[in-house]
Structures are given as C-alpha cells and as structure tokens.
C-alpha cells in the first residue's frame, strides 16, 4: 500500500497520527483546461496564482449547498456574495499556508502516508486500499503528487493550529467573569403582537398592489428550471443468479497464494531520544543509556516514554506503535525489533532521528487461510465482477448510442433496455431522484444541455448508478406577470403592512408602559400574546423566540428597581415588547468542579480559534491580492 509514498520515506514512523483541527483546505478535482475567458487565474496572492478552476469549483459547491439549504433559487445578490466569500476563503488559505511554511512547520512523508491511509474515502472494509486510492484520484483527474502536496499543507496548518490551542489559556478572573455571564438569569415578561391577526383589516386597492409588485420584483420571480429526460441503469440490476464453478474458485485461490497469507506482526513501543541542534549523538546515546538503566530498575515504560521520548505521536500513549509488519520502519529499527524476545527491551538503536529503546509487547505469527475459509469471499467477488462486467458493457452501449444520436434518448433507452424517464420541473437544487446530486445538476444546466439540447455523457449519479440525460425545455428565471401572481402580491402586501401596524402598536405599548402603565394590561388591550415566565430566564430558555431572548440578555440592567421596557421586530413579522425586571449573575460555585475544568478547557480552545482567525485576518490584510478583472461578471454569465 502507498508504495509511491513509501519509496520517498525518509524516516519518521508511519504510525504517528495527526489529529485534525478545523483544516480549511480542500482538493480541487477539476480539469483546468476547460476554462477560458479571463485567463487561468482568479487571483494573485503575493505573486502566487489561485487558479480559476479552483475558485470556480469552490464557488459552485458553496452555491449548491446554499440552494439545498434554502430550497429555493438564490438571488443575484446572494450568489455574488457567496462567490466573493468563496474567493476570500481561498485567498486566506493561501496566505496562511505560506505563513506556516515560512515559520518552519513541516510534515514528513511518513506522517503524510498515515494520514492518507486513515481517510475513509480510500478504505475498503475498514482497511486502506492502494488500488482504490489511485483509482479515486485518477477518476477525478488528480495526480498523486498534487493530492499529497495539498494534504501535506493541510497537516502543516494543523501543527500550527495545535500549537496555538495547546498554548492558549484563561486567567481565573477571565473565567469567573465568563461563568457569571453564562449563568446569568433574568426575570422578564414579554408580549407578542402577531400581524396575522391584523392582515384582514389592511386596506387593499389595485394601484397599491401594482406599486408593491413593481418595488419587489425579486419576490415574484420564477425559479430557473428544465424539463429533464433521462435513462438510468443500476449495478444492482445486473446480479446473476448463477455463480462461478468450484474449479474457477480454486484457480483464483491458487493464483494468489500471498493474498491469503498473513505475515508475522509485532506490537511494540519505543522511546526516542532525538539527535538535533541541542543534543549531539553522544549526548543522545548517554541519555538513552540512562533511561534504559531506569527501565532495568523497574520504572514504568509508559511514564519514561511520557517524560523522555521525543516522538510526539507516541510519547503520550506510552510509546505505543501498534501492530506492524516488516517494511514499516527504518532498517536498523526493524532489525532490532524482529530480533527481540517478548517483553525484552533493546539496547539503544540508532536511526537518522536519534536513539530508540524498543520493547516487544506481543507477537502474531504468520498464517495461511485455507480454501474453505475464503470460499465465500471468492464467490462473492466473482459474482461482483460478473455484475460489474455486465453493468459496464451496458453503459458503454448507452454512451455510444448517446454520441451517435445526440438529440434523442430513445436509442439510449433501447441500448439499455430501460425506459426514458422524465422530471418536468428540475431546478438547480435538483428534483425527483436527483435532489442535491451534483453530477446530474451540473450536466442538466450545462451549455451543451440547455443551448444545444445534446445528450450528456454517462454520468455517475451514485455508487453503481449510471445516467444519461438531456434537456427538452429550459425555463430561465423571470418575473412572473402581475395577473399570474396577483394573489401572492396581495398576501405579501398585507403581510408587510400588517407587520408595520404591529410594530406601531408595539411602540405605543412600550411608550405607555414606560410612562407607568401596567405592562400586562397594555398587552391585553393590544391583543398581544402575553408570556410571564414563572422562573428566571436562562440563556438557553425555550419560552420565547431566540431573537427576543438575545435582546433581553443584551438589554441594560434595571437601575434602582425601575424595569427596562424595550422591543423589536422579529423575522416572521411579529413585534415583541418586553419588560425586564431583574438580573441575577451566575455563581461559579454552583457548577461542579469537573464541569468547571472541562468548560475552562473548552473556552481555552475557543480562545485559540479566535487567535487563529485573527492571525489569518492580519495575514490577509498584509498580503498583496490582485483579483482577475471581470471575475465575478464572468462567473455570472456562465
């Protein structure tokens, strides 16, 4: 596995695992040759180019995510903001990566290898698959070198962030202040004036509706959509009722003897005394000898590893290296490991990193699985291969038919033996069986599909799911005629005017309450829904809308026993008026010590995140950034 990486190994153990904390790096799986119009870059950051392909991929992903979340088509203003945010994120990534490199953060080949091996995308049955790894990148058009370099940069940023997290702390006074604010409780009553009760009384005339329609065209736009036709096949449809013969299974078993042999494995731990700028080889050897002598006197290997080992990946776990086979470690280390008896500690072993003390903890001898043990596995593999062969044979016929008949799916359907299916209203968020399916959405809204009416190529719509589609009709975004949406216009007009009336009534209620009127009586007169909690409100209270609770906790404390009266308009059009009577600070002593310690650690990490964000902003401000001319106009025109 990972032979291409192992060939470049220079040492540090592949079992060291980096814990990732908010790595803001992504891999670009885009063919850069397919973009024209404004050159090959989206921006230049301190002279380095950010490719147009990378920006476009990032922007499209962000746009699709927002459309899926909102379940509606984004306005031009929203799309532009998302595109600008995507560009800003990529620029910050570049300046942070350069800073981390200049600060000397480095990731060894071994650390990189272990990180990639742990990625679920490249694992089959819980184990890393070298073939799957290479195939996934090749299928996406990404070279091994480019992918590995991107991941190396991501892990270097991890190291930098981890350092900030580990060094961040809160003073006792800061933490006490936080607990007092977090645990603060407030006594308040509030009244909600709902415009729904006022809509019917709003006067309406055609002229007013026409003006409202003209002033709010975006509210009455239709969503862009297409009439989609498609032919699909699924791998599960090609399963065969007949399996391979016994002889065929035997031949596969006999042809792969190494596959069913398990090599000897050893579980070990080590203590590394590094040779570096502060400690030469002689000093490292002397310290290794001292540590070995302490082991001989019965001191704990785990505690000595935690106190003396210079391997950050294993020191805090007692030096544990896990189960390993041959070919994992540098030759001197491996030779020593495979010569040890159980529970034996080696003499100091020198590698390019320093001196190691190695202890063999457990041993798994090699073994060979018999034919009967693996027969079921071989049979299932043979069935899967047969299904895949039939599946790919059909998709090739479909692809040929689509190319030979670009304006019709009927020949494709004939080649597949499947019907042409239709989705009449397919939007940029997807529809039918393809909601949120990026491959299908991109193909359906491509220029070839919309402008030329051509069949798509074979699309991978999911694991073992192939689709060819075409667009029979395109419906662009348009402002729907007034007569078509008159009822919608009237409903929106009434809602807006009713919300204004609710706000006016709420303002009057507050004015009279501040003048000494009884809050509950005034709320009743206004037809408001009154809420008077029986207990003090906490920051996580569920009694009212979150925007209202946030306002209550932002309000000034009542002075000299005089209640505070204030209000706000809520996003749903309701007006909320509240009366704040009392503020009770949180008491740190009310929180158990274990919870206090855990919360303090979490706050320290949160503080570190703030430091990371602030430094990234400073680096961005100091960088020289040149954005390609007409970048966003070019994006919008596509």
Image (spheres, grey):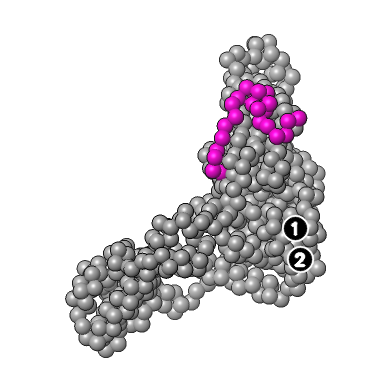
Q: Residue placed at 25% from the left, 83% from the top? A: 512
**What is the quadrant of the N terminus in the image?**
top right
- The residue to which callout 2 is attached is 628
**Residue 295 can be seen, yes or no:** no
Would residue 172 be found to the left or right of residue 352 on screen?
Answer: left
Would residue 507 be found to the left or right of residue 81 on screen?
Answer: left
Magenta highlight on residue 392:
no
Q: Which contiguous range is marked in magenta?
A: 404-426
- Of helix, strand and loop, which one carries label 2? loop
Q: Residue placed at 60% from the left, 35% from the top? A: 229
Q: Nearer the viewer, residue 209 or 250?
A: 209
Q: Residues within 10 Å of mark 1 (few under 14, many from 20)?
A: many
Looking at the picture, does residue 21 appear above or below residue 462? below
Pointer 1 with pointer 2, Cβ within 8 A = yes
Q: Residue placed at 46% from the left, 77% from the top? A: 174
- Of helix, strand and loop, which one carries label 1? helix
- The residue to which callout 1 is attached is 52
Mark 1 vs 2, N-terminal side: 1
């Amino acid at each position: 596995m990972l032979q291409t990486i192992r060939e470049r190994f220079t040492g540090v153990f592949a079992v060291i695992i980096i814990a990732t904390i908010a790595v803001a790096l992504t891999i670009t799986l885009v063919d850069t040759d397919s973009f024209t119009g404004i050159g090959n870059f989206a921006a230049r950051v301190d002279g380095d180019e950010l490719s147009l392909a990378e920006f476009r991929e990032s922007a499209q992903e962000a746009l699709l995510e927002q459309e899926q979340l909102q379940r509606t088509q984004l306005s031009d203003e929203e799309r532009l903001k998302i595109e600008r945010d995507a560009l800003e994120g990529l620029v910050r990534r570049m300046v942070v990566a350069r800073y981390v490199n200049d600060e000397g953060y480095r990731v060894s080949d071994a650390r990189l290898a272990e990180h990639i091996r742990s990625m679920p995308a490249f694992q089959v049955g819980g184990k890393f698959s070298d073939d799957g790894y290479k195939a996934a990148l090749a299928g996406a058009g990404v070279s091994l070198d480019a992918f590995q370099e991107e991941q190396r940069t991501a892990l270097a940023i991890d190291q930098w962030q981890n350092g900030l997290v580990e060094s961040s702390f809160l003073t006792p006074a800061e933490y006490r202040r936080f607990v007092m604010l977090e645990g603060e409780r407030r006594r308040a009553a509030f009244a909600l004036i709902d415009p729904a009760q006022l809509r019917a009384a709003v006067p309406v005339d055609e002229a007013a509706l026409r003006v409202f329609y003209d002033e709010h065209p975006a509210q009455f736009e239709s969503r862009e959509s297409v009439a989609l036709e498609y032919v699909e096949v699924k791998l599960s449809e090609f399963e065969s009722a007949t399996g391979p013969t016994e002889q065929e299974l035997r031949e596969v078993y006999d042809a792969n003897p190494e596959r069913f042999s398990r090599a000897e494995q050893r579980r070990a731990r080590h203590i590394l005394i590094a040779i570096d700028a502060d400690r030469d080889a002689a000093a490292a050897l002397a310290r290794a000898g001292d540590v070995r002598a302490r082991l001989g006197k019965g001191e704990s290997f785990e505690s000595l590893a935690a106190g003396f080992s210079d391997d950050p990946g294993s020191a805090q776990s007692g030096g544990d290296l896990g189960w390993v086979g041959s070919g994992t470690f540098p030759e001197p280390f491996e030779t020593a490991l495979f010569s040890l008896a159980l529970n034996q500690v080696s003499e100091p072993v020198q590698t390019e990193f320093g001196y190691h003390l190695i202890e063999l903890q457990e041993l798994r001898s090699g073994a060979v699985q018999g034919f009967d043990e693996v027969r079921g596995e071989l049979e299932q593999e043979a069935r899967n291969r047969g299904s895949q062969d039939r599946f790919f044979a059909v998709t090739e016929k479909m692809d040929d038919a689509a190319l030979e008949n670009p304006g019709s799916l009927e020949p494709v359907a004939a080649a597949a033996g499947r019907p042409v299916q239709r989705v009449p209203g397919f939007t940029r968020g997807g529809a039918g069986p393809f909601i949120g399916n990026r491959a299908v959405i991109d193909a359906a809204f491509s220029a070839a599909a919309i402008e030329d009416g051509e069949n798509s190529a074979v699309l991978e719509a999911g694991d073992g799911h192939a689709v060819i589609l075409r667009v029979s009709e395109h419906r662009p975004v348009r402002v729907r005629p007034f007569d078509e949406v008159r009822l919608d216009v009237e409903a929106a007009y009434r809602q807006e005017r009713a919300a204004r009336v609710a706000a006016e009534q709420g303002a009057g209620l507050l004015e009279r309450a501040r003048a000494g009127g009884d809050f509950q009586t005034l709320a009743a007169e206004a037809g408001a829904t009154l809420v008077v909690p029986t207990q003090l409100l906490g920051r996580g209270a569920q009694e009212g809308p979150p925007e209202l609770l946030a306002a209550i906790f932002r309000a000034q404390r009542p002075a000299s026993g005089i209640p505070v009266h204030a209000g706000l308009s809520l996003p749903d059009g309701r007006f909320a008026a509240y009366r704040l009577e009392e503020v009770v600070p949180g008491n740190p002593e009310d929180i158990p010590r274990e919870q206090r310690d855990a919360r303090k650690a979490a706050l320290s990490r949160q503080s570190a995140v703030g430091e990371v964000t602030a430094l990234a902003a400073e680096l961005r401000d100091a960088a020289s950034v040149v954005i390609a001319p007409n970048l966003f106009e070019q994006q919008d025109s596509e």
